[in-house]
Amino acid sequence: MLHQSLHDEAAAERFTHVLLVKSEPGSASQVVDQPLWWNDRFAVVAAVSLTYMLTPHTGTTAGAGYWSHGRAGDGARPSAPTGGCARLHDAGMARLSAKERARLPDSAFAYVDASGRRRLPIHDAGHVRNALARFGQVAFEDEAARDRARSRLLRAAKKHGIMPIGFISAQLQPQRKLPRGHVTFLLTDIEGSTELLRRLGDEYAPLLADIRRQVRTAVRQAGGREVSARGDDVFAVFERAPAAVEAALAIQRAMRAGAWPGGIDVRLRIGLHRGRPELTETGYVGISVHAAARICFAAHGGQIVLSAAVRAAVLESLPGGIGVSSIGAWRFRGLPEPIELFQLDAPDLPASFPPLRSAVPAQ
C-alpha cells in the first residue's frame, strides 16, 4: 500500500509525474500521464483517474508499470521497486524559492484570495501539474473563487500542452464531495426578484452576485456544501442539521446588514428540510429535495422555515436566544403528505410574517 504524507506548502510543491500503463492479456496497453506527490521516500498519486490502479511494478504485462518522467515513445523505462513501492526521480518541477515566488505576478497563480494570499503557481508546466494535483486540497473562499481558479488552471494546462485527465474526471463528478445518508438541505430564494430586476436594471447582476457571495460564505463557514445556484436561488447541503441552522441565521443577519443599491429592501426566504435522498452523478434525487424546495418557496423574505425533521435534529442544540415556533401543518402540491412546519426565531431578526405562500393548511 502507498501511504500519503502531508507537507507544508513549499514541500508540497515538489511534484513529478508518471506514466501509468495498464495492460491485460489480449488487450492493448492504456497510457495516462499523472502528477505525483513526491517526498524523500516515496511518491503518492494525488490525482488518478478511476480507470487506473497503482501497484508495484513486477516486470509482467499484468499490473501497472512506473516511469520516472517522460511520455510514451520517449524511451522511459520502469524504475526498480524499492521497499514495495517504485522509486521515482524528482525531475518534474524546479524548486520555487520564496524570492522567486515573490517576483511572480498575480497572473502566475491560479488562486489569489481576498486578502492577497497567492496559491497554486502556474507559471510553468511543472507547477501546472502540481496545481492540478493539489487543487482539491485548497480551501477556497466560495464556489465562485473555486470556479475562477479552475478556469485559470485549465487555461494554463492548455497553454503548456497538458491533458489533465484525472483532474477533469474529479471536477465533473459532484457526488465525490457531497455527503450521503441523512442530510439537511438549505435553500434560499430572493423575494420579489422580478420587481428588483425591473427597478435595478443593469445593477441587478452585481446585486445577485453579492447575495450569492453572502450565502456561500455562510454555508462554507458552517461546514456546508453548495449543490447548485440557479437563477435567484442557492441550494446547499449539510451533514449536521445544527450547522444548517447556523448558516441560515448568518445569511439573514448578513442580508439585514447589507448596503443595497438605492437603499432598497432586499430579502431572502430560507427553507430547511432533512431527509435521506439518493446521490447520483447529477446531484441529489428524492422527495426530500422537492419538499425542501416547496418549503423555501412558501416562506416570506426574511423568514426561516424548517420542517419537523429539522426541528427534531436541532432542538437540543439551539444557540442561546434562538427559538422555534410552530406554524402548523401544510400541504404542498406534488407531495403526498402534509408537512409540519416551524419558524426559526432570533431576537435580532423579524418574527412576524403572513401565512405561508403556495401552501394549503392541513385539516
Image: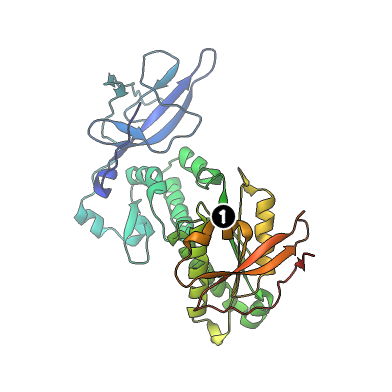
Displayed quadrant of residue 279 = top right
Q: Nearer the viewer, residue 42 or 186?
A: 186
Residue 71 visible in the current orientation? no
Above or below, 196 against 164 in this view is below
Q: Nearer the viewer, residue 334 or 92?
A: 334
Q: Which residue is mark 1?
A: 184
- Asked if residue 62 can be seen in this view, the reply is yes
Quarter that holds the C terminus: bottom right
Q: Which residue type carries mark 1?
A: Thr
Q: Quadrant of residue 12 in the image? A: top left
**116 sits to left or right of 346:** left
In the image, farthest residue toward the right: 363
- Residue 296 in percent (x, y) is at 65, 65
Residue 205 rendering spot, x and y as whole percentages: 57, 72
Secondary structure beneath dot 1 equals: strand
Q: Is residue 249 above or below residue 27?
A: below
Q: In the figure, is residue 123 to the left or right of 297?
A: left
Identify the image quadrant of residue 103. Answer: bottom left
Residue in the foreground of this view, choosing between 27 and 206: 206
Q: How many marks?
A: 1
* Residue 182 x %, y %: 57, 48
What residue lies at 47% left-to-right and 73% top-to-bottom?
321
Q: Residue at x 58, y 82 (%)?
A: 265
Residue 185 placement (x, y as % from top left): 58, 56
